[in-house]
Amino acid sequence: MRIFKTLILVTFILSSFILPAPPSAQAATLPTGFQESIVFSGLTSPSNIRFSPDGRVFVAEKSGLIKVFDNLSDTTPTVFADLRTNTHNFWDRGMLGMALDPDFPTHPYIYVLYTYDAAIGATAPRWGTAGATSDGCPTPPGATTDGCLVSGRLSRLQANGNVMTGPEQVLIEDWCQQFPSHSVGDLVFGADGALYVSGGDGANFNNIDYGQSGGTNAGYQKNPCGDPPAGVGGTMTPPTAEGGALRSQSLRRPAGEPVTLDGTIIRIDPDTGLALPDNPLISHTSANARRIVAYGLRNPFRLAVRPGTNEIWIGDVGWNSREEMNRVADPTDSYVDNFGWPCYEGNKKQSSYDTADLTICENLYIEGTSAITAPYYSYSHSAQVVTGENCPTGSTSISGIAFQYGNSSPYPIAYQDALFFADYSRDCIWAMFKGADGLPDPASIQTLVDGASNPVDIEMGPDGYLYYADFDGGTIRRIEYYGQNQPPIVAATANPTYGAAPLNVSFDASASSDPDVGDTLSYAWDLDGDGAYDDSTLAQPSYIYPIGNHTVRVRVTDNHGAYAISDPILISSGNTPPTPQINTPTLGTTWKVGDTINFSGSATDGQDASIPASAFTWTLIMHHCPSNCHTHPIQSF
């Protein structure tokens, strides 16, 4: 979601997957008494988690699928809605925001925010294929050359049980996006019942962008978003250019010029998508301006509301130097917060945009720093958040923000009203504790999870635990607290995991252990995959499987009641997995930006005489190593 920084493309891997990929094996380090566990697995690029008051859990996948689990023990989700045809799932684009109506399920509406695979007012899919999970951007136009022009869409879906009923109700279609990052952002409901929506600037992340890009390839226009003063097809030059990242400052354009929603926070009526009557700019002539309560943001990827208030807290992904945590103290006062991007990054002038002498920025500089709202907290890309921690520096992208609330949380009292925030690139989650004034205190930050698994959304669950979406591993994870009694560490194996039916499988969890000396362990197995741990209490049971695929887990409990559940073990009876091979490109192939790389592969299988091309799934993964290495899934084929 280019919640991720400026990219340096180092290498790529083309992989074919026949069986589901295992969950991430990265080991997390947490403070004493805390533990991370996997709640749901088998998901594909989960981007949002939302908890319903009736116990259900909704998970949005970046492709445009929404799945619903009946409860936290459910292992077989139902597809609630499939918006893949409308969603452009490419690089950082996709379904990125979701919220349940505050009175759900009595008021049975789910709100979604996604990259719409078409220009504003056009028909999807423009670049992808109907029903496809992953989309592309061909060359030409080229993802970062002329760009595949798309937009953003906010819609309301009606629930009937566990499935969507009726048509998608489109509330807003806006957020012009030329380049594949800084797309739409997040959705939250305030205590006032208003729906708050964030969106990025849609600009180029490789270099300064004031709308000058486009028109390199025949048939593709310059300035396709039509920003002033040149309009669609026109040449944009300093100092008058107002496009690209400067769309985040469109509220400062001269009267009569269009106001966009790029780089803003809007406050709307959830039934209509219109501005609420107590918004600060309700008398403005522009419908978009009437919606806006904050602007000057680059990629406000995640939002949170501080409990008991209408304060809006924003995790804004930075560019070259800093990540920002911004606060809108009162969305209905007369002041519309301007956080300064792209003229400012952090609380300093952004050097590249300052050097360009752009009128919008120069006018803002003349007004001084009183014209912008400084970040509530920011951290440098080159510095640790907590001195001495193991979280890496360099590549950085704030990717989650959530408040602990209520007095019934199982966490220690110090965490009451704490603010949690996550960074996808650093794979870490932190807690910012409450200060004397009741607000989070930037001087009291503690590392909560070091070595988290690719967090892109963090939410407080109904049980008072913090949950997060593991984007790369396809899991939903929970941060639990057990105090002085730590839960067991599960180690479970199966042999064999596939073969001819009926298949006799031996399981072994005897290598499981407990960090607390002297604790004893008991075992409960779900061997038949029905979600109930009632099939065996042995450490080393066996089970005979009929033909088919089966999922097995074991729950290991200590003598004080703390327990942990294993990752799922997939058993395939009557079938063996194919053996895939990448034929081209060969290992060691070199390339330069703009080259076309052809790829091909083959596979052998014990059951099937031949494997058709339709059985192959290819995934392009970018390894990004500005300092600490991590990956970005680019596209699947």
Image (spheres, rainbow, N blue to C red):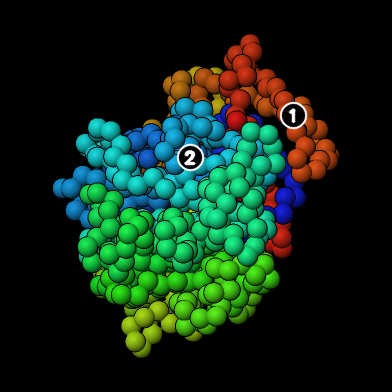
- Residue drawn at x 40%, y 79% is 440
Residue to which mark 1 is pinned? 598
| Residue 562 drawn at (x, y percent) | 37, 61
- Left or right: residue 220 versus residue 97 is right
Q: Secondary structure at mark 2?
A: loop
- Left or right: residue 378 versus residue 55 is right
- Residue drawn at x 77%, y 37% is 595
- Check residue 461 in the rendering and tell me which mark sits there, or answer none: none
Question: Vertically, is 436 above or below 551?
Answer: below
| Residue 589 drawn at (x, y percent) | 83, 37
The amino acid sitting under disc 2 is Ala
Q: Are marks 1 and 2 in contact (CB under 8 Å)?
A: no
- Residue drawn at x 23%, y 66% is 278
Crowdedness near tag 2: few (<14), some (14–19) or many (≥20) residues, C-alpha within 10 Å: many
- Left or right: residue 299 versus residue 75 is right
Instruction: In this rendered view, identify the residue nearer to me: 256 or 611.
Output: 256
The answer to whether residue 126 shows anywhere in this view is yes
Instruction: In this rendered view, identify the residue nearer to me: 629 or 77.
Output: 629
| Residue 230 drawn at (x, y percent) | 57, 51
| Marks 1, 2: nearer the viewer | 2
The answer to whether residue 563 shows anywhere in this view is no
Question: Vertically, is 416 above or below 402?
Answer: below
Residue to which mark 2 is pinned? 119
Instruction: In this rendered view, identify the residue nearer to me: 82 or 545.
Output: 82
In this view, the residue farthest toward the left is 106
- Residue drawn at x 60%, y 14% is 608
